[in-house]
Image (cartoon, grey):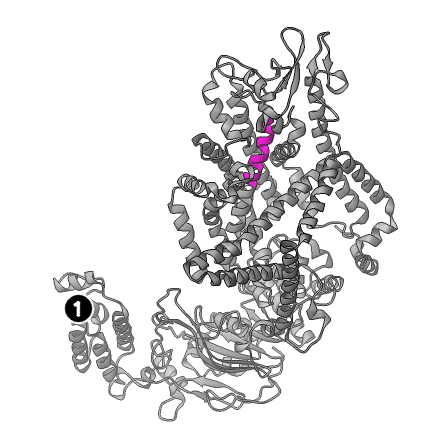
Amino acid sequence: MSVSESFEPTETTDESRPLRERVADNPGPARFWLLGTAVLIALEFGRYIGWVYQLVGAVKYVIGLVGLIPSWIGDSVGEATVPIVSYFVSDTITLVLLFGIAVLVTRFTSWSAVDQFDIGLSDRIVRFLERAVVTAILATLAVLLAFTPVGGLVNGTIDGVFNTLSSIPTLTSHEVISNQGHRTPGGGWDGTFLGLSPAVAWGLRTLLVYTYALTVIVWSWKGYTIFRDHYRQADWTPRDDTLRRFRSHYWGLFGLIVVLMFIVTALWAPAVSPTTADQNIASPYEYEIEYLNDDGEVATVTPGAANLGSISTNQNTVGPMSYDDYDRWAPLGTTPSGQNLLTHIAYGAQTSLVIGLLAIGLGGLIAVTMSMLTAYYKGIVDILTVLTSDTIISIPAFLLVMMLSVIFGDHPLAEPLNGGLLLGLIFAFVYWPGMWRTIRGPSLQVAEEEWVDAARSYGQTPANTMRKHMAPYIAGYIMIYGSLLLGGIIISTAALSFLGLGIEGSTPEWGRLISDGRQLVSTPSWHVATIPGLMIVLVVTGFNALGDGLRDAIDPEADTGGADDTGTAAAGGGG
Amino acid sequence: MSHELSQEPIATETDVPTDSDGDVMIEVEGLKTYYEDGGLLGGTPVKAVDGVSFDIHRGETLGLVGESGCGKTTLGRTLLQLEDATDGEVRFDGVDITTLEGDDLHEWRRNAQMVFQDPESSLNDRMTIGEIVREPLDVHEWETPQARRQRVKELLDTVGLQREHYYRYPHQFSGGQRQRISIARTLALEPDFVVLDEPVSALDVSVQAEIINLLEDLQDEFGLTYLFIAHDLSVVHHLCDRVAVMYLGNVMEIGPTEELFTEPSNPYTHALLSAIPEPDPTVERDRITLHGTPPNPRYPPAGCPFSTRCPARIRPAEYRDLDDELWNRLNTLRELLSERQRADRSVRDRLRAAVGKDTRFGTVEETYDELFGDLEVPARVQSVLDEIATLARDHNESEAIAVFNEAFGSVCDDEPPAYHDMSDGGHQSYCHRHTDEYRSPDAVIENRHG
């Protein structure tokens, strides 16, 4: 295993040195890798900034929503009692929220007043005072941002900077490799990249997207190997084994590839689709495109009007790999409303990703947290959770989803993604009891293990005990169940869209394509329902395969013997 | 075995071991640990540890023996505050640890650690050996991370493993090696006091000896104090300086190992020791067979906890000549009566009884037939039995028990005994027979079973 183990003194000196010094000793490989990384980032800089901007927007949205909580509660209380009470209530809740943030802030920063000052008070009181001070600072900041021009100024600056930076053209943007142009009477193409046909230009750009993504992944792996070979102190760590196990897990690798392609498609949706969703779907009458009409003249038309002329129904069809009458390239054909199917698929991947990951992530988080708490503390916490989950489970899941999406239809939560965010939250709420149930048995089992008692005997905190000694045994189950459920959520989203309760309007969604193209499967426009259907199958299978591979990889007992298949299956959580 | 027996005499009275000697490390006084039912309505708790008092001296090994379910493990866990004590005190160097909370408790936990019974379950399989042994150090933020890693490797060395095992996983080790890892983790924080909860009972016999020797060496090296919980008496004989014998949540006898093994005082210890297999097949030895099972710890007997099964139970003078077998049957009858008293009779049972059908308790006649059918019962006993039968038939069990106690009961059933000093070495026994008015347990057992 480790050769350097026998040279005790060298090892000790090595271990005490931080990464920065180790890099300084041998900067070559690190410099090489960082240079490559810089080039890769520079190529797509504008897009990355765009993502960050979206993230900032999401954070702002969440802050805005949380900021509304005190006044909602305050107003309700005020209406029920005396109006003046509402101010006290909302102020109190604001302070409580800020104190919660202060607790998080103090927990995740290494600086602590306890270590710095010795006032003669107990640690507990000092910690409380420290948090109170942070709360006061946060409150001042909040007041400053909300009630003075400072807030608007800060907001404007942020928006300005991000807008400027994100408009920088990138390698894969439509401006650089354009596939939007028209035929010329002479037989060539005008307006496209190097005068190539839109099909070739689009193919080039799409190829570039996936090549770029692949390069990023390979480069990250390269970075890891450089770190491992040149800078890591230990010759071997458990992580190596995890990676080794995953690398030889071909089913898991297949899943990883599918999932990565799905994510890349979602992230680079504007580049992968021949046209943007805004131009093709959201506001098609605010743009103009040129095309060569039947009279051999170049004419202009709005995409909205063009869409009406290129619909895929049982009579007309713009099939996969063809142009419509307006010189627009449709790699996967068009929808029954004439929009580009690939645009729908690519942007729909975003929608599915957000809903699925939000639902599984949030629901799984609730399920794991509750299962840890109920298994560790039992008693009243357990009884209350059982009651809550039974209540939720007793209502048919789909009915509950429908009911909630109707109730919250006008809520501010329903705005993002035409209700996609709301749907994700609803699915999380509806499905966590199921997830909790599936991992409840294993959690109770692992809570009875003696190592949990052992952890308590040397004073490990309950939170850490749950995280280190219980959660890893649950991870396998939640991954498998989560990946299975992800398919169910994509399908439920589709079913809701079919009933007119899910995502409507301008947000593309795979399920809606299937319900739109259902009757067309036996017609020349078979592609409308078939292609998204196959995509769902592929993505769901991919997530399942990835979950399977991850589970086997994180379980050190999984590779005791190659032939021990039953052991692998059982080791998922039994321990 | 070669350890010196250097105890101070424990205080003479049962519940006042207020020994202020510097040698005493842990003073347990009137400790009770009851398990409440999970239900919201309370109910009768299980009395796992029911009023235990003893001292543990610095540097000694105190053995704690008893049959399964007698509360030994619960006692060990309560000493480490893994269970909340219901009542009583555990003074660790003078500080009552049952009242410690928060930071104080966290800090105290450094001093006392536990080695668990099952090495398969006491090590988290998802962590490397290094992480496992290091965790106590991390929890208590012991020096720097580098120093911790160094210390873990030294600890692995100390318990007879290799430093390279730092990055291995528990499933790559055998039971004995896993127990060594567990011991290394226990030692990480340099505790003063270690509870060994049957540390070798899950291991092969050959490996047991290695672990026992390791524990002895570590005790010498680090000056540890052990509480050794076991049911293997030969291991206890070998390892411990003093032994406490537990039965149904009570310490029945405590004393220096050698003395206790050669001259047991308490009837329960007699019975327990007679169960040790004798390697020499030619030795004639009478085993004292205990009848029945230990009582339900939820409803322990009112008097001496061992009274229901005691081979030396005090019998009333007028029935002293009765056959031993008949006494066993009478004891069984008593148990049945108290069981019937506790059982809730459902509406269905009452209805069935009213229309003369069988209830799940069976009729008194059946019970009597089963118990006394094949025995010759003297007339004076029979008359009492008839009286009891009449009462029991009317489901007046409490009255029936009163009649039974009136006739066949003795001080054993009525009053808890006191601890009596057996020698100067702190040898104490919990039995009524040590008072002057009764014959000693040894003599009685010799008489009845010899």
- Is A387 above or below relative to B425? above
Give the residue number, with chain letter if any, for mark 1.
Answer: B365
Q: Is A351 a magenta residue?
A: yes
Q: Residue at x 40, y 69 (%)?
A: B36
Q: Kindly identify which chain the residue marked by label 1 belongs to.
A: B
The magenta-colored residue range is A343-357
Identify residue type, mark 1: Glu
| Number of disc labels | 1
Q: Residue at x 68, y 45 (%)?
A: A241
Which residue is at the far bottom? B436
Q: Position of residue A102 (x, y in %)?
A: 63, 61
Res B343 → quadrant: bottom left
Which residue is at the far left? B355
Give the crowd class for mark 1: few <14, some 14-19, many >=20 residues within 10 Å. few
The residue tagged with tag 1: helix, strand or loop? helix
Res A470 → quadrant: bottom right
Is any atom of residue B300 visible in this view? yes
Left or right placement of residue B135 versus residue B201 in this view: right
Q: Position of residue A24 (x, y in %)?
A: 86, 51
Q: Position of residue A302 (x, y in %)?
A: 61, 20
Left or right placement of residue A3 versus residue B83 in this view: right
- Is B325 above or below relative to B438? above
Left or right placement of residue B47 versus residue B111 in this view: left
Is any atom of residue B204 visible in this view? no
Q: Position of residue B64 (x, y in %)?
A: 51, 75
- Is B162 above or below relative to A562? below
Q: Is B183 a magenta residue?
A: no
- The one of A16 and B417 positioned closer to us in this rendering: A16
- The one of B294 and A169 positioned closer to us in this rendering: A169
